[in-house]
Image (spheres, grey):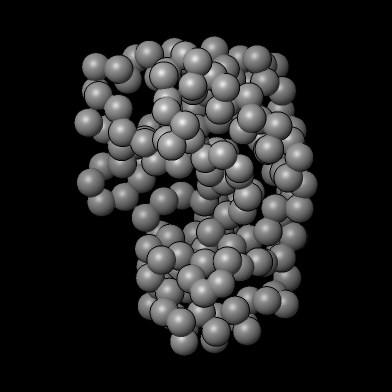
Amino acid sequence: MNLYLIALIPHLKLREQIKSLKEEMKDQFNAKHALKSPAHITLQMPFKRNAEDEHLLINTLQYFASKQHAFSINLDGFGCFAPRVIFVKVTNHKPIVTLHCQLKKVLMRNLKFKENEIIQEVHPHISIATRDLTLNSFKEAWAEFENHKFTVSFLAKSVFLLKHNGKYWDIYKEFLFQK
């Protein structure tokens, strides 16, 4: 069984900027778990599939992406899910929520995902600290990042399939939206 994740991923330069924020979390607050994945907005939480079924997963995502249109994603400031997660805020949720709703239907219909395998509602964000942020470190980190400035936009022009290699998430395949 392979472990996968479906996400929107910003361009390389922005991924590197966000990685430096994750590195800051690691260095200052000993929170390194978020470094196990590239900067991303989760569309489908981690799920397991047999290696033999990977071609069906890839074909389905290719078809799904070919029917989508590129859209802008706006990031502005930071938010949190207390007491463990700090993230870069996505300000325009609607196109991501719409994309997720369409993806959810395709995963259930074409790939026989069960209801409990699907994220029912997405809360678009890009985590910079998660899971291993202690309660005390969370308070300190949030005090520092709560009013920190970070404003940028990027074009979402594809969905990505990430595959876990046993230690961290690799970008495995990119599926471009229709031109």
Q: Is residue 163 left or right of residue 148?
A: left
Quarter occupied by the N terminus: top left
Give the percent coordinates (x, y) of residue 107. Answer: 49, 23
Q: Is residue 162 left or right of residue 21?
A: left
- 74 shown above or below 159: below
Residue 21 shows in the view: no
Residue 98 shows in the view: yes
Q: Residue at x 71, y 23 (%)?
A: 69
Instruction: Looking at this view, name the residue that lies furthest to the front.
Output: 115
- 87 shown above or below 95: below
- For this rendering, which residue is in front, 58 or 83? 83
Q: Residue at x 70, y 32 (%)?
A: 98
- For this rendering, which residue is in front, 38 or 49? 49
Q: Residue at x 55, y 80 (%)?
A: 141
Q: Residue at x 63, y 84 (%)?
A: 143
Quarter occupied by the C terminus: top right
- 129 shown above or below 36: below
- For this rendering, which residue is in front, 71 or 134? 134
The quadrant holding residue 66 is: top right
- 75 shown above or below 110: below
Give the percent coordinates (x, y) of residue 154. Answer: 70, 43
Number of numbered tags placed on the structure image: 0
Q: Is residue 14 left or right of residue 77?
A: left
Give the percent coordinates (x, y) of residue 12. Answer: 54, 45
